[in-house]
Image (cartoon, grey):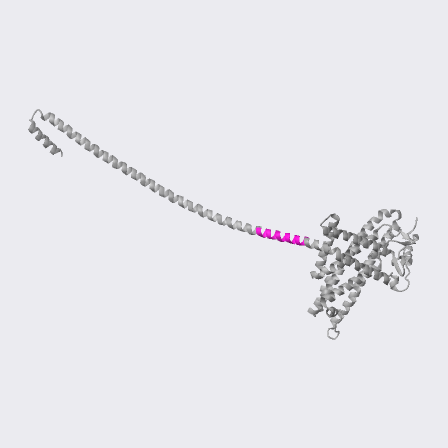
Amino acid sequence: MNTFGALDLHISIAAQEVFAIGPFPVTNAMLTGIAGLIITIAILFYVGGKVKKGRYNRFVGLIQWVFEGLLKSIDDVIPDRVLARKITPLAVTIFFFVLFSYWLSVLPGLETITVGGVPILRSLTADLNFTLGLAIITIVTVQMYAIKHLGILGNAKGYFRNPIRDPIGAFEGALELIGEISRGTALALRLFGNAFAGEVLLIVIAALTSYFATVALPFFMGFELFIGFIQAYVFFVLTLIFTALAVSHGDHSESSSDHSLAKPKKAKLAG
Amino acid sequence: MNTLTQFANTEAPSGDVFSALGINWMTLIFQIVAFLLLVWLLGKFVYPWLIKSVDERQEKIAAGTKAAAEAQAAAVAAEARIEKLLKKARVEAADIVATAKLESASALAASEEKAKKRADQIVADAKADIEKEVIGAKKALHNETLELVALATTNVTSKLVDGASNEALIADALKAVK
């Protein structure tokens, strides 16, 4: 009987290159990501087409129900309806694409199907390139809406204040700036960490349980599906909260010089 | 220990921290662009229809809720109106009953009075008729008595007196009777 230490487990933090197109490396995460992309497009276009024609079935109803729930969350977090509608495509796409991509990590053959010794399946969410890209898109979009909503100077006031006239405000602005960077980093690392840990968990459980993997793995796969949903929803909600915070920080920095009042509001939203 | 060794040896970081974490700038940019394209595609062709259908459904629900609230308010108002009408009707009915009782009592009293009057009239008329008949009967009896007296007197006197003194006697008798 094999011991765990003797197993040839292949765990890599970075997505592995399957082949290259010129200088462009095509990784296993990208291949799975393309599958996730096709699934997302196929499902949402199918549902959109059915809704457009007014032909409903249970699957369409399910997706529409989820969509309606997401829309309600957006309206709850972002009170400005126009802004809420503008952020909807990004936030909802993040939810669905992260969800489907994450769920692909529970596909059987995650570690066993290999091409040239490289596992061909790896969830896109377990690739830091994707999660970091998603975080960059989110932070940049949030800043764009903040600038649109508050103006360039109005938005900049949230981060840069005169340290002589308002030292506490300046300190708070610096913290806000650091906060923006840390939010983006945390956004990327949270999703990556969960997805990567999930994949490792499945691999380790499969290795540890050996022939009993068929019995043990489904429980962990179900758990991973649940975690996938949670992570997709967390990313979605954080996108909304960051947007709400970014467009509102100008309001309370102008309306109140009492920083002790502004902070709990932010903390409440972020919490 | 083997486990730890296994994980520690899985991927030795090579180069800088980004490449150790598998961050490749070309891949990163490619994935950002691909995701933005996906957002644009779905935002252009899918979400508008879904948002429209959700908005329509919410409008229908809002309209239904509003209609239900209005119907409930109308029902409450109608109930209040009905209650008011019933109260008014009860008061009116009580008034009508009281008036009817009063009117019937007065009508009864009036008819009783009338009946009494009529009865008194009938009794009075009857008394008058009886009196008249008594007087007539007395008169008739008187006349008859006179005739009988005259006849008897004639019969008695016809044998005692002549014709002339007879007539004188009769005349005196009549005068005495009168």
Query: Is A143 above or below relative to B169?
Result: below
The magenta stretch spans residue B72: yes
Q: Is residue A100 left or right of residue A113?
A: left
Q: Nearer the viewer, residue B73 or A142?
A: A142
Most frequent secondary structure within the magenta stretch = helix
Residue B101 visible here: yes
Image location (x, y in percent) of residue A151 = 72, 68
The magenta stretch spans residue B46: no
Q: Residue at x 75, y 56 (%)?
A: B45
Residue A270 visible here: no
Q: Residue furthest bottom?
A: A164
Q: Nearer the viewer, residue B161 or B29?
A: B29
* Number of numbered labels in the structure image: 0
Q: Residue at x 77, y 69 (%)?
A: A174
Image location (x, y in percent) of residue B134 = 22, 34
Looking at the rendering, the stretch of residues picked out in magenta corresponds to: B57-74
Image location (x, y in percent) of residue B124 = 27, 38
Image location (x, y in percent) of residue A54 = 71, 50
Q: Quadrant of the N terminus of chain B?
A: bottom right
Q: Residue at x 82, y 50 (%)?
A: A221
Q: Residue furthest top?
A: B159
Q: Is residue A205 left or right of residue B165?
A: right
Q: Nearer the viewer, residue A43 or B99?
A: A43
Q: Residue at x 87, y 57 (%)?
A: A27
Query: Is B81 above or below relative to A159?
Result: above
Q: Quadrant of the C terminus of chain B?
A: top left
Write down the quadrant of residue A84 in the picture. Answer: bottom right
